[in-house]
Image: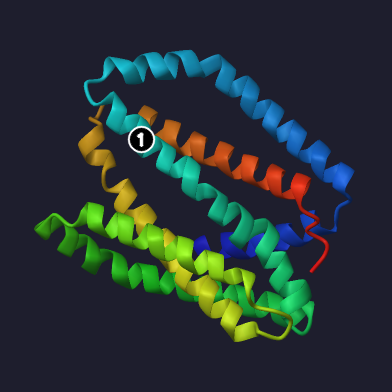
């Protein structure tokens, strides 16, 4: 399901990439407007709920990790860089789509193999925070390096994407592991849902800023 979803996101990114800017703005406005209405209706209850908790600061900080890291998947994996790779770096759209889908598949396999091993090691030795910070830094560093590949640098771009995406997914794994410590059976859904919603808001804000302040149609 994960791989199919990734390929669907790739195809969707081409459709969005080919839209005119005013169509994208209308699309984003409708989505953001829906989120703002939703947030306005529940934000008071959410924050009242959070501040009643003894560990409210930890919960809020943990939730905003999703807000900060979700732009990676929105911009790199789904909308902006995937289309840039297929339409500019790769020789043609067909080969680019194939290579990009394979890169996402490699990421999923690596994460599936690494997660149980590193997760068990982190739990036994108390290294969860170390791995969370480590993979977050790796993801940020290799994402910044995506600035350098030019047309024809297929394998350099794919290598950087795979490493950054593995680091992103591993960081998410260790971030999610804190949910058990921050919640109980009664509020686990609300705390998890709050972080998940903030992540989508962060991704949409990042996408809106990119489409507003940068011409993504210029290589």
Looking at the rendered structure, the number of numbered marks drawn on it comes to 1
Residue 188, picture quadrant: top left
Q: Which residue is mark 1?
A: 61
Seen in the picture, residue 42 relative to 5 is either above or below; the reply is above
- Looking at the picture, how far across and down is residue 124, in whole percent? 10, 58
- Looking at the picture, how far across and down is residue 32, in whole percent? 68, 32
Image-based side of 73 in relation to 57, left or right = right
Tell me which residue sits at (86%, 53%) in the image: 19
Seen in the picture, residue 56 relative to 84 is either above or below; the reply is above
Tell me which residue sits at (65%, 78%) in the image: 149
Residue that protrudes farthest toward the left in the picture:
124
Tell me which residue sits at (86%, 47%) in the image: 21
Helix, strand or loop status at disc 1: helix
Image-based side of 116 in relation to 202, left or right = left
Q: Which quadrant does the C terminus fall into?
A: bottom right
Seen in the picture, residue 133 relative to 121 is either above or below; the reply is above
Residue 137, picture quadrant: bottom left
Is residue 1 among the parts visible in the rendering?
no
Tell me which residue sits at (57%, 78%) in the image: 158
Q: Nearer the viewer, residue 185 or 141?
A: 141
- Looking at the picture, how far across and down is residue 2, in whole percent? 50, 61
Image-based side of 71 in relation to 210, left or right = left
- Looking at the picture, how far across and down is residue 43, in whole percent? 49, 18
Residue 173, picture quadrant: bottom left
CA neighbours of label 1 inside 10 A, class few (<14), some (14 to 19), many (20+): few
């Amino acid at each position: 399901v994960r791989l199919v979803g990734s390929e669907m996101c790739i195809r969707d990114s081409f459709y969005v990439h080919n839209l005119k800017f005013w169509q994208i703005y209308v699309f984003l406005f409708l989505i953001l407007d829906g989120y703002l209405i939703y947030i306005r209706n529940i934000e008071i209850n959410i924050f009242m709920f959070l501040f009643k908790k003894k560990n409210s600061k930890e919960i809020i900080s943990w939730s905003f990790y999703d807000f900060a890291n979700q732009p990676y998947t929105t911009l790199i994996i789904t909308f902006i860089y995937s289309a840039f790779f297929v339409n500019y770096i790769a020789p043609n759209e067909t080969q680019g789509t194939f290579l990009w889908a394979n890169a996402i598949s490699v990421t999923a396999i690596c994460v599936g193999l690494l997660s149980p091993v590193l997760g068990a090691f982190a739990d036994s030795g108390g290294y969860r925070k170390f791995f969370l910070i480590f993979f977050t830094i790796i993801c940020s560093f290799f994402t910044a390096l995506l600035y350098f590949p030019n047309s024809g640098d297929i394998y350099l771009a794919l290598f950087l994407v795979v490493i950054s995406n593995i680091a992103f997914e591993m960081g998410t794994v260790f971030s999610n592991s804190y949910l058990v410590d921050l919640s109980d059976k009664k509020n686990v859904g609300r705390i998890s849902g709050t972080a998940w919603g903030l992540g989508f808001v962060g991704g949409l804000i990042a996408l809106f800023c990119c489409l507003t302040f940068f011409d993504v149609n210029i290589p």
